Amino acid sequence: MPLNVLATNILTNSGLNDPYVAISGRTWNSQNELIASGWHPFYIAAGTHDAANDAKKLHWMSSVQFALSFGGIDYHIEGNRAQNMWSSYKFDAGIYQQISGLTPGQGYGFDIPIVTYWRGPGYPDSDDKMVKQVGIDPTGGTDPTSPTIIWSATNANDKAWVYMDVAATAQASTITVFAKVQAPENDSVNHTDLDMVYFDAAHVAPVPTTTLTANPSGTTVNLSWSGSGVAPSWSLKGYEVQYRDTTGSSWTTLQGKSNTNTSGSFSGQVGHTYVVRARTWQKISESYQSDIDLPGDWREQTVTLGILVSGRVSDNRGNGIGGVVITESSSGATATSGNNGLFALGVAGSGQYTFTASTTLAGWTPPPPLSATVQLNQTTLLSFTMRPPDDVINNGDFEIGSSNWTVSGTAPDTITSGQRSGSASLHLTGTVTLSQSGSVANSYQPVLSFWYKMAGSDGDDVFTAELLGMDGLTPVNGFTTSTNGGWQQAWLPLNLTEVYTGPIGVRFSLVQGGSPQTSVYLDEVSLGGSWGGPLRIYLPIIFD
């Protein structure tokens, strides 16, 4: 086992005390700028004044060097020094240290107190000016802009020591810890006021591993957690537990880091997905601070309450329609379709459910309710096809059999199990023709839309749909299939003129080619204008 696994603090010069060493190439007022031994300075060019000139307005000193230079106080928490950094211009900068000889796969925590003084200690407290943050690169890199760095949350409290901490799992035998402050451009006259930073009393140590279990039950998520591997000389402080709905970014704290309870629960909404996370905190007492704590790595679980039912609302051409409200009948749960027609809502568990659509959009009307059997670990998809305001078809849902339709050949019947929507779908068998007609006035791009399902076909049985138009109701568009399949929508445009006035109709036929007998099921037949309308631009007439 590496010795550092047994160490209380595995940093070199964790107190940022003497000795301090000169930073090559950096001087201020004929003095060498200094960095605590074991540490290195850095700045991020994008956020630092005059970075192209090596940020010469940014300086690092020991706390005593700064105090002697400006007649101030030697600020530090423990030992004899702290690392000072200052400028009167904007900067994004700090210090870092690489730590080697570690165990890949082990979690490590980093804690360091930082204090900032916007425009100096004599200026009023100025929170939200200078932003503190710490990070760990688990790969051991030294680039402060690397995407591999895991950064802590930020803190911008001014003129108070703030203990900043973060944890990460080592991906190599070396990790790098970073502590930095971002300060905006100093707005003092002639930049005479100084923005000051002090770093002191850092800790890095192995941290506990957290185990998290999440079990959803109805609208409740039951959680349990535990931690193992508290570092030597450290003790368990507690477990921090949070959750958030994936529809948002804000975390809700279920339990704070000082609480040692190992289970809990929260209530959510059916159909919503939640991310839950937990981490174990350890603590140590030092002479200057009795409760220094380090977090472990977050452990996350994702849970969905109930079962998610999703689908799409479309017009008679299959284009998505937004603003349609989908309701689950028994619970009253609702979802509204987006601009692409997509929607999703949740149900409590497995079973048979009924869903309805409602809208006030320009006279378009929904189909009858859709019923669906919902099962765990199975995707349930629903499709609602809206019918146009000028629909000429009567009983297009076949809720009253073949009434209003002209039938020749084998009389169709209805099915009340496995229907597409409502209480029934029409069942065609044998050789049969089914037709209906009407008339439209100023109908924009009329379309025949219907849902069908073919079963039992051996390839020589033919189902045909014909769209009829013009005087005499002659066929102007058609659809033919001999292919078995599940419920699917088909649509046929009239394609005579953009805006049509006149007779219009539909004819369905099934022709059997021999045994066995093919069945075709029909539902949700509509015939009327398309969504939208012609775009007209009226221009003034100008006479010379």
Image (cartoon, helix red, strand yellow):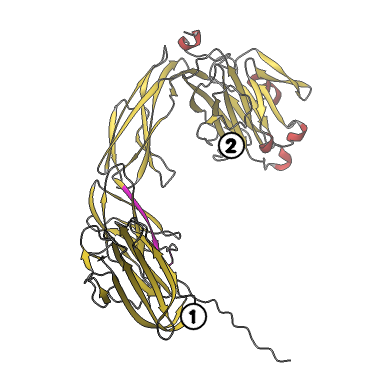
Q: Is residue 309 magenta?
A: yes
Residue range in magenta is 308-318
Does residue 441 appear in this view?
yes
Q: Position of residue 390 (x, y in %)?
A: 38, 78
Q: Is residue 200 magenta?
A: no
Q: Position of residue 513 (x, y in %)?
A: 32, 63
Q: Main secondary structure of the magenta part?
A: strand
The residue under label 2 is: 130
**Res. 43 image quadrant:** top right
**C-alpha separation, residue under disc 1 versus residue under disc 2:** 65 Å
The residue under label 1 is: 499
Q: Position of residue 133 (x, y in %)?
A: 55, 32
Residue occupying image coordinates x 28% and y 71%: 432
Tag 2 or tag 1, which sits nearer the N-term? Answer: 2
- In depth, the one of 75 and 328 nearer the eye is 328
Judge from the rendering whether residue 542 lies leftward or rightward of residue 456; answer left or right: right
Rendered image: mark on residue 434? none
Q: Are marks 1 and 2 in contact (CB under 8 Å)?
A: no
